Image: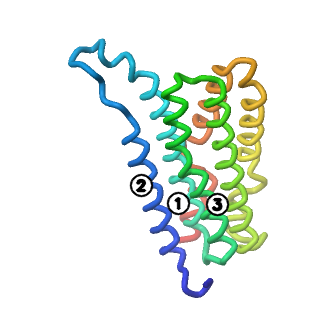
Amino acid sequence: MDNAMTKERLEAFSDGVFAIIITILVLNLKTPHGTTFAALRPVVIPWINYVLTFVYIGIYWSNHHHLFRLAHSVTGAVLLTNLLLLFWISMLPFVTGWMGASHFATVPVFVYGAVMLACAISYYILERTILTNEGPDSILANALGNDVKGLVSLGIYLMALGLVFVNRWIAVALYAVVALMWLIPDRRIERAAPVHH
């Protein structure tokens, strides 16, 4: 299995899955009933929710690309952990639709955060699996270091899940904070990439 799978094939498959997820996400948006600006009012909340999730998917896609840019090979463990990440990201259209349709009700906001936490944990596992494969002295290992940013993100998600039943808007704000933290692709890898090439 390891010899048949190339890094390029894994990336192409992952890119296809990301594209399908974004397509499903946008298909969940409902069109306004009416032809006036007032008709847009009921779709504002779902649209904001869509934007937040689109940004998240874009961040994962971008950082996934950067991560594999410095990886040299693909192992069975990398394949499985990559599929785990794609599984949780594929759940985002469902939880996004639920949160938007409920106008950010507490339980949907909690479930959305739980899926986002699962995505973050899966990405972290994928990152560590690739690092194990590449070795402690690899360019990728030197570029990532201790990945404090990733661990801080996990902590914020856990904090949001703990606070969602106190005030759901605090949780939503914390989800947005994580998105802002990762909006710019990982510069550590971007700095290391020219050396790799």
* Residue at the spot 56% in from the left edge and 48% down from the top edge: 91
Image spot of residue 111 (x, y percent): 65, 36
Image spot of residue 173 (x, y percent): 63, 25
Q: Where is residue 67, by image quadrant?
A: bottom right
Q: Earlier in the sequence, mark 1 or mark 2?
A: 2
* Residue at the spot 48% in from the left edge and 75% down from the top edge: 9
Of badges 1 and 2, the one in the foreground is 2
Residue type beneath disc 1: His
Left or right of 4: which side holds 30? left
Neighbours of disc 2 within 10 Å: few (<14), some (14-19), many (20+):
some
Pointer 3 residue? 84
Residue type beneath disc 3: Leu
Quarter of the picture holding the N terminus? bottom right
Count of numbered marks: 3
Outermost residue, left side = 35
Image spot of residue 18 (x, y percent): 47, 55
Q: Earlier in the sequence, mark 3 or mark 2?
A: 2
- Asked which colour scheme the image uses, the reply is rainbow
Q: Which of the pair 153/186 is nearer the observer?
A: 153
What mark, if any, has residue 120 been given in the picture?
A: none
* Residue at the spot 37% in from the left edge and 42% down from the top edge: 27
Q: Earlier in the sequence, mark 3 or mark 1?
A: 1
Outermost residue, top side = 38
Q: CA distance from mark 1 to mark 2?
A: 14 Å
Pointer 1 residue? 65
Residue type beneath disc 2: Ala
Pointer 2 residue? 19
Q: Which of the pair 149/139 is nearer the observer?
A: 149
Q: Secondary structure at mark 1?
A: helix
Left or right of 101: which side holds 127? right
Neighbours of disc 3 within 10 Å: few (<14), some (14-19), many (20+):
some
Left or right of 41: which side holds 72? right
